[in-house]
Image: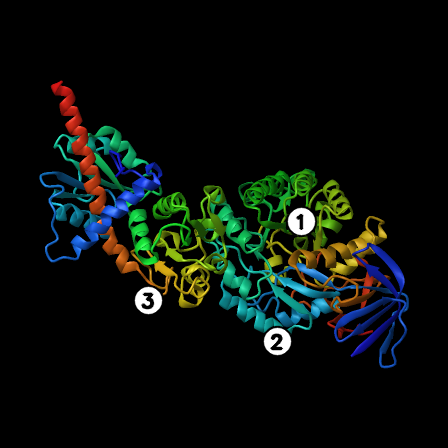
Amino acid sequence: MTILFTNARLIDPESLTESHGDLLVRDGAIVAVGQVEPPSDAEVIDCGGKCLAPGIVDLGVKIGEPGERHKESFRSAGLAAAAGGVTTIIARPDTTPAIDTPETLEFVTRRAAESSPVRIRHMAALTKGREGREMTELGFLIDAGAVAFTDSDRVVTDTKVLSRALTYARAMEALVIGHPQEPGLSRGASATSGKFASLRGLPAVSPMAERIGIDRDLGLVEMTGCRYHFDQITTARALPPLQRAKANGLKVTAGTSIHHLTLNEFDVGDYRTFFKLTPPLRSEDDRQAVVQAVADGLIDVICSMHTPLDEESKRLPFEDALSGAVGLETMLPAAMRLYHSGDLTIPQLFRAMSLNPARILGLPQGRLSQGAPADLVLFDPDQPFVLDRFSLRSKCKNTPFDGHRMEGRVLGTWVGGHRVFTPED
Amino acid sequence: MTFRARHLLGIEHLSPEDIRTVLDLAESYVSLNRRTIKHSDALAGMTQINMFFEPSTRTQASFELAGKRLGADVMNMGVAQSSVKKGETLIDTALTLNAMHPDLLVVRHPASGAAELLAQKVNCAVINAGDGRHEHPTQALLDALTIRRKKGRIQRLTIAICGDIAHSRVARSNLILLGKMENRVRLIAPPTLMPAGAADLGCEVYHDMREGLRDADVVMMLRLQKERMDGGFIPSEREYYHRYGLDAEKLKLARPDAIVMHPGPMNRGVEIDGELADDINRSVIQEQVEMGVAVRMACLDLLARNLRADRGRQAAGEMA
């Protein structure tokens, strides 16, 4: 099958450039980019000058299989991803039970392949039951297809356990993903300490808890030589240690969530629980510092941290409500806010949303160049709309962007050259 | 003949010449042990005390038999009935026993350096039968004798030691001995069970067992302690067996005439395939046990000779 995309604004995150031109796809792979002579057998898609970019690789998506399929299934997550321009979901292991054995991993791999229109790759837990006591069967899990190891938002507090797991992982060149946080300091907190939390009377955590977490983990990374990724860096004061670690040649990368890039603590307003996240939303100064770090390439990855929660978990007093927000479908339009504000260019955004996560995980996706898989998203960065949370394809509708004016609409999504999303209107 | 040592605390203190002396003498005891009347008078009239502060079957039995076959009066002191249970310190126990004038003290203790500490406090010969994760010299010597008999030499061989290197006194004594005898020693272990700085000990370090086994003449498997099996140092027994357990398929990478050794007791299906352990064409595990008695007889004999010579010199000094 041959498809020719013509008249496209081509977003190349490798060279951080955009250009006007064509893109030719044959047998699921990109075979030519730029000015292409149309082959006679090609299906031609006129992009109308809109953006054509490598599909998003979303590092850290919670799906409710096994255990909570009423919140999100591989099918619903896959449909939401396709509508949001996400072509590869990297699923989290914080399910019920946790994905901590090769048998569970094989089960979810089979389920995902049967039911999702987009690619799904799986992470596995670093410790059994995510309890921070005993490492999982890293070798068997890698053989079964695990792309990384993480206990998600649970911190392995026993440094001996973590150092042994990192030592073992290092020998297999496995990637470990950690959540930088000092769990003692952040226990019971539901906001970031500061004026807002004080006014609202919410239990709060100092942003220093993130810095202490990153410092400890970097010490263990230096000791063991393991490849390590911080799932979410959200504060200004966590950035200097990250920068030093990278300058010293540690194999360290970092991500942040689209919500922490586009919202701050004041958005919580009148105790709106859809804005309760882990870690909590930060000050405006922190948000700006983190946006700048993405522009500089210090923070490598933007992810949605998609966390589907049902109405019952959110319709509670702020302190009692669960943390997390869905993001698969809203990540791209939310990212366009950073483009329209002049903070980041579209190639910079796709470097963080597509190229870097694929590189870190060793996947061939995320590039708009010859030989790469034809995982593509076509979108109009300027088309405005008002988000209605009940229009989301995810089973849970807990988005903080409900009723927000957004710009940026997905016009089509392709996975391996197959179209998996076409807008209804 | 060399071997002038007063104690046998570790391989570290022995020269290649000392090692050859022990092995040569042990050969003669191998023949003795195969006779119906297995008796010599080398230690006649001497007292040997076996002090085991850690449970042991084969090493204790081996030392007891060795002493008895050489004609010594042998006493076993297990930890269960010892006054250590009543709170006595190691040194007090040693001084109490020392007052009873033993000639040979065989010690096993869970703390590294315990045998050395005892040797400073008593005036008999001390044999280290395993101290913590430090040394187990008679095991290395019996392994060397087994290898020499099977391979015809104990030089220029490629020897792979695989398993829990970090916590193994057997591995430490063996790598020192094999290094002194100019062999190529490879250590194979998951990184969590590899001691820090292993590469600086003059060995080659492998985390991939298949690579480490390639063209080896000897494969030495180590026991994995039960308490290290789950999650702490390794993820699970089955993952360990998959990656670091020796089976016929992995052994194919070694030389076709490679021998398989294990200091025992074995965990079949954890570090070694049961069938392979029983394969008389490859496994020399039973021979190791046999060589153990002979090597310990040689060690006891040599130390007793040195002890008599020392005491003779002392007596001569007193007379003059």
Label 2 belongs to which residue? A114
Q: Quadrant of residue A65?
A: bottom right
Residue type indicated by callout 3: Asn
The front one of A337 and A252 is A252
What sort of colour scheme is used for the picture?
Answer: rainbow
For discs 2 and 3, the disc positioned in front in the rendered view: 3
Looking at the picture, how far across and down is residue B191, in whole percent? 48, 50
- CA–CA distance between discs 1 and 3? 55 Å
Badge 3 local density, few (<14 within 10 Å), some, or many (20+)?
Answer: few
Label 1 belongs to which residue? A254
| In the image: residue B192, left or right of residue A215 | left
Q: Quadrant of residue A368?
A: bottom right
> What residue do we see at 46% from left, 47% from top?
B203
In this view, B165 is above or below A138 = above
Q: Quadrant of residue A66?
A: bottom right
| In the image: residue A376, left or right of residue B95 | right
> What residue do we see at 23% from left, 36% from top?
B126
For discs 1 and 3, the disc positioned in front in the rendered view: 3
Q: Which mark is residue B281?
A: 3
Farthest residue to the top: give it: B320
